[in-house]
Image: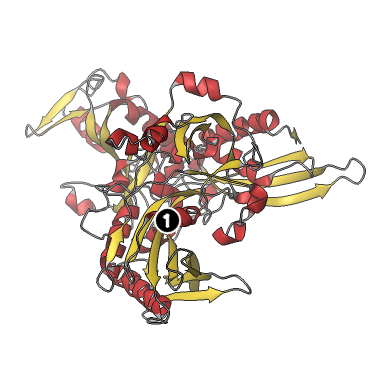
Amino acid sequence: MNDCWHRKVEDQQKGLSSEEGSVFSMDSRAEVFFNVDSTKLAEFPCLADKKFSCIIFNFPHYGRKAGVKKNRILLASFFLSCADVLTQDGEVHIALCNGQGGTPADQPMREWHNSWQVVAMAAEAGFILSKICPFDSSKCDGYRSTGYRSQDKSFHTEAALNHIFTRSLQFLPAKPVVIEERVGKELVSFQVPGDLCEYMNRNFLDKHSEHPVNILQQELLKEVGLTWPVQRIEKKYPLLFKSIPSAFSYSDFDILPSYIYWVRPIEIKKDNLLENMDSGDKTPAACAEYHTIYHTEEECEQAEGVQSDTSEPELKNGIGYALRPSLRVHIKKILQQQDLEIDTIYAHSGQIFKRCPISPNSLPSSHEALLIQAFDPSKNSEAACKLQVSLESAISTMAGLMPDSKIIFPREGLLSFQKYSEDPRYHIYIGYKTKGSGEQQQLIGSLVVMPHNSTHTKFQICVISLNLDLLSMLIFNVNDWRMLWTWDQRFISSFGRNNMTLFKEFSLYPPSYSHDVSFWVETETFDELEFHALVRQVSCGTVREVTLVDSFQHPHMGHASQCYRLIYQSSDRALSYRKALELQLLLRRELQQRLLVTLR
């Protein structure tokens, strides 16, 4: 699509009709239509029944001395029109003069309010900016810019940019999830907390998964295996664990008590399969380790209203059920079930959960890897140090496979192992820096040495836990942890099963919107993490960051006013201002109904 005012006049002078529907053949390679309204493509008779794989609009303009607001309206209307006639995997190309688009690719970049805000306008129709490149008029044979302020005059196309847009996935609320799991000799059914439903049953660590978390894990074990024998623990352990909350050692898992996801069971019953095993039944069905995930309407209706506050456990005989905050809750059982060979590394991985505030570095669900090694301190007193060296060498090798990475890792001292006061663990930090910034450190795991507590009392166990998600983000250049959980297949296609490659972003310069919410709370009962969980759920994960900007304690009434600033920005889907406002209004309603706060 192009502004062909000049060409149209020439054709009229030649006596050619330019009424709606007129078509001209150009060497049998193209058809040219005049009087096509770019904001109503589907209404044009000759285009109504067609689907296009690519729609190109070079230098759109509202006309004459139109300001940025009218040109934004033109862009938004054009994108909405394209959605009707574009194939599902099609592209929309828009060429704009330097500065008009309002993205960092413009040099110099205009202030946001003084630009056409092309990415935000595209989001109104569900499009994301997937690529941006210089506009090269020399590749368009016979192209000449014209139409400056609706006149037969050319305009500057130097440093112009071609913006390529593609469709994004829609925002859909996560379906409720009910899980039945074997915990000890019981089958426990429970409803997954609402803000975690999006992360359940994703199977990123399956053997044939091409997710970067699994690619990283496989590469890590391969590198460590060059120094030590490595054996995978394939047995699956339940997502739930049960404990007496007052006796649970939160310090062992580097997590505060308020960060545990306690759940309220829907039903607890005896496990008949285990009874069959006790009676001698060794069939695969009886011996299977399993858990079932389902979300039929009937079960969800049954569970509705059961799952509520996840910060306080519902106790039965003093025992509560919680989602595992770390795989280390299974260490005792692993040591009981595994006949550990000295100096062999046993690897186990799985999904973990933690109640946390919404921030760029806080993950409510992630994947953890355990590396367990038994050693005899009388014969190998430096076993833990050697394992540290092997781990650092493995991560350094993987980082070296990414020469074009935005993340720069130091050649020496990649990992640091820091110990705090009486904490028996060493916290593992990885050092890095991004181009144009100073050195930074990211906590990625821990190391602890403990007695075996078995018949082999002289042996000790070295346990390393690594957060695979945080490490993957650094190695593969994934800027937003939410991208690891996207349903968009373009994310997975960025990586190869046997090829360590950097992530190639398919959503560039996503717009962000700021909204504030203020409400009165009872300070003794208000749970801030429950507020963050509700924001995460209601916003469909589009809130990137939540900040407390003001707090006021009423001098007489006893309650407090909290004001939070929410930054809406989606890393993989088209988020428009209209959609962000819709989610914000929905959040305000849910806050009153579910947290029983008084909005200001």
Q: Which residue is at 32% across, 47% downward? A: 491
In the picture, measured across the screen, residue 154 lies left or right of residue 529, that is: left
Q: Quadrant of the N terminus?
A: top left
What's under tag 1, amino acid-wise?
Gln
Colour approach in the figure: secondary structure
Q: Which picture quadrant has residue 596? A: top right
Front-most of residues 156 and 287: 287
Residue lying at the far right of the rendered structure: 556
Front-most of residues 244 and 350: 244
- The answer to whether residue 318 is above or below residue 500 is above
Q: Which residue is mark 1?
A: 336
Q: How many marks?
A: 1
Residue 26 visible in the picture: yes
Residue 52, how many percent across, how many down? 22, 30
Residue 157 visible in the picture: no
Residue count near mark 1 (Cα–Cα under 10 Å), binned few <14, some 14–19, many ≥20: few
- The answer to whether residue 378 is above or below residue 254 is below
Residue 32, how many percent across, how many down? 18, 30
Front-most of residues 310 and 415: 310
Residue 586, how many percent across, how many down? 60, 30
Q: Which residue is at 14% across, 27% downward? A: 24
Front-most of residues 541 and 472: 472
Q: Secondary structure at mark 1?
A: helix
Residue 391, how many percent across, how many down? 36, 71
In the picture, measured across the screen, residue 45 lies left or right of residue 430, that is: left
